[in-house]
Amino acid sequence: MMNTHIYVENNKAIEIKKIPTLNYDEFYNIAVELLPKEEVHCVNYFGFPYGEKLKFICAFADDKEHKIALLSYEFENKNVKDLNLKSLTETFPAMHIFEREINENFGIMFQGHPWLKPIRFPHNRYDKKLQISQYPFYQIESEQLHEVGVGPIHAGVIEPGHFRFICNGENVLSLEIQLGWQHRGIENLFLKNENWLGRNLLAENIAGDTAIGHASTFASAIESLAGIKISKRLKIERMIALELERIATNTGDMSALCTDIAYQLGAAVFGILRTPIVNFTQRWCGNRLGKGMIRIGGTHYPLTPELRRELHEVLKKYKKKFLEMAHQCYHLVSLQDRFDDIGTLTKKQVRLIGAVGMAARMAGLPRDIRKSHPSGGYEFVNYEPITLESGDVFARFLLRSKEIQESLKLIENIISNDSVFAETDDMFEVDKPLTIQKDSFVLSLTEGWRGEICHTAITDNKGDLLFYKIKDPSLHNWKALELSLRNLEISDFPINNKSYNLSYAGNDL
Amino acid sequence: MIETLKILAHHGMQYIPDVKAVNLPTPYRGRPVISDAKVDENKLANMCPLKAIGKNPLSIDLGKCSFCGECAFKCPEKIKFTQDYKLSASRREDLIIKPGENKLLKVNPKYVRDEIKKVFGRSIKLRQISAGGDNSAELELNASSNANFDMGRFGIEFVASPRHADGIVITGPISQNMAEAVKICYDAVPDPKIVVLCGTDAISGGLFEKSPAVNRTFLDSIKVDLFICGNPPHPLTIVNGILQLIGR
């Protein structure tokens, strides 16, 4: 068993040579053995130039055993363009996005993959002749059906993407989402940027609504590579920041959902309630979205007793007003009528497409890194994921409300515990040199508010970054939005879109 | 009905009465001031990943600055970030902060086209375009219209179509993949029209300035009317910037 793959834990760096190198058939066979288990899913699978070779690493997280299996295979660079590998997607559709990415980056074909479409049109893609305006949409030839194209620029103040609907009258038969418009080459900039502060800032700019999620995933990965052990206090503070980010965005999303059903009171009140939370984040670290909060190995902003008192007051007021509004929503017939049984996905479907985070939990699949691969502050709390069964827009609305309440409970319990904060905090020093482990690999998972964020860092023989891979949960979950729209009226698109609130920047990188 | 009224009563008035005079608490990082203290300028300039710090004399380009505040932590006797959130100007060079200066940054009416105040002074409708950003400026633009900041009371609103707009607000460094769409959208706005660059990424490209995936040539062909600084800009920064532009 151990000579085919190796198990690691979240945020535990290992030497890269400890990952056994297989040939593709061996890799395929082991993947086929691991993937059928419900508790196993692929958290990342990518290729990168490794000397004269192209090296592939695939990570399967086992949520029951709290371990991550790493598999690897390699090809000579010069042989890559003629490769035609047996596709895993044929048996495990959740792998579709990773094989598409590998195909887009390196031109490798996967035999049996239903359609190797581009996922982001990166500047360093294999086929530079293919432009973003030439995306190969699924097409129909029928006099009864029509197509509706929306984007890349949308009606609201939101990120760009192109949505193509195939409709039979008002009914949507198929929705296809084309992304890549936000691509700014961020992964490569991690390698080009010569200082760690620059990389730290990049991590805060992967997806602005998940600044704390991505930055803390980055910091944990680098701390592991540099052998930095941060204090329990700092771990807890990062967890509080992440939970505040979760409360703020979920509240904002509930406001947006109310906006789209023209429920003015809910839209205004949830919108107002987001403000004290982001304002507290600003009071803590100077930025409403938490930029500046997370730094490698330390912080400039310890959570002082005064701030903890303020936070306690803010949350107390928030909670009362939030519960009042949320309960009003649960009983509102006009809201139920618009949310119930709309955009339903089953547990089987979300598992097939590899959905993560709230998009999995809303249909009964308990994927939550806080429980399955706890790291940082979550090592000290016993977080139990919340799952719902119905998988519709209402489930996504209700799940947000429930997760907010869990986050409130978690923060309230921990900030009242003075012993946690008795320890001195790790202070950040910008020019403190980092000694990074050479020829190493680390995988870092965090449960951001959308779902699992996965960062992977690989170092070379000098201890520099050789490769940095970012995966935002949206990469998996866009497929959930596409499926939710099937057989719905096209007018139900906005509430479905808001009910997932996926990241374009996180997908496009 | 009673429950609805109760909720309304519990929230009361939520809007900020005077958006021009709000005291933001520390450690919010607004307009920096640079002292005359003698420091190793090279060291400070080199530590900034965005190359926002210039030398001889030491200066900070707010169009490049991401307001991370690390320079102020490194050299508190030289650089201090104040809580002044008014961070907009209509000329790119006005965004550069020099030593010993502690004057407010504002849109100088001298450099604003006359027609802007005349045509848009009482109502302005904008079309926002995200072009390679991280969605943070978008979040703050949305917040500017919420019940707290309530930009709508000044007649400033975002609209769905460029054809209904008086100008565009660009966020993000303008990715290669969005370059064409930005141009098409700009062309679709009827004259006279304004262009606003919102956030570090849009103003200078920020961390992405040198990325091969970014294409900023669109900006060479147009005149920018307003630069709103911040990463992302605070909603108050956004509201004040637009108000200053339209002369209010």
Image (cartoon, rainbow, N blue to C red):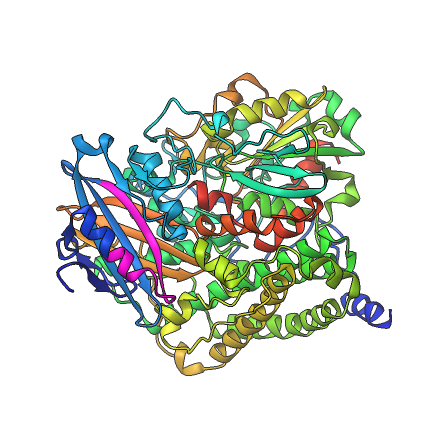
Q: Is residue B59 visible?
A: no
- For residue A407, above or below residue A473: below
Q: Position of residue A182 (x, y in %)?
A: 48, 37
The extreme top residue here reads B221
Magenta stretch encompasses residue A33: yes
Closer to the camera in the image, A78 or B203: A78
Magenta stretch encompasses residue B178: no
Question: Horizontal placement of A6 versus B64: left or right?
Answer: left
- For residue B66, above or below residue A289: above
Q: Position of residue A158 (x, y in %)?
A: 60, 42
Q: Residue at x 73, y 21 (%)?
A: B114
The extreme right residue here reads B1
- For residue A332, above or below residue B230: below
Q: Is residue B74 visible?
A: yes
The answer to which image quadrant residue A186 occupies is top left
Q: Residue at x 78, y 56 (%)?
A: A264
Q: Position of residue A90 (x, y in %)?
A: 37, 47
Q: Position of residue B24 (x, y in %)?
A: 60, 55
Total number of numbered labels? 0
Q: Quadrant of the N terminus of chain B?
A: bottom right
Question: Horizontal placement of A185 versus A20: left or right?
Answer: right
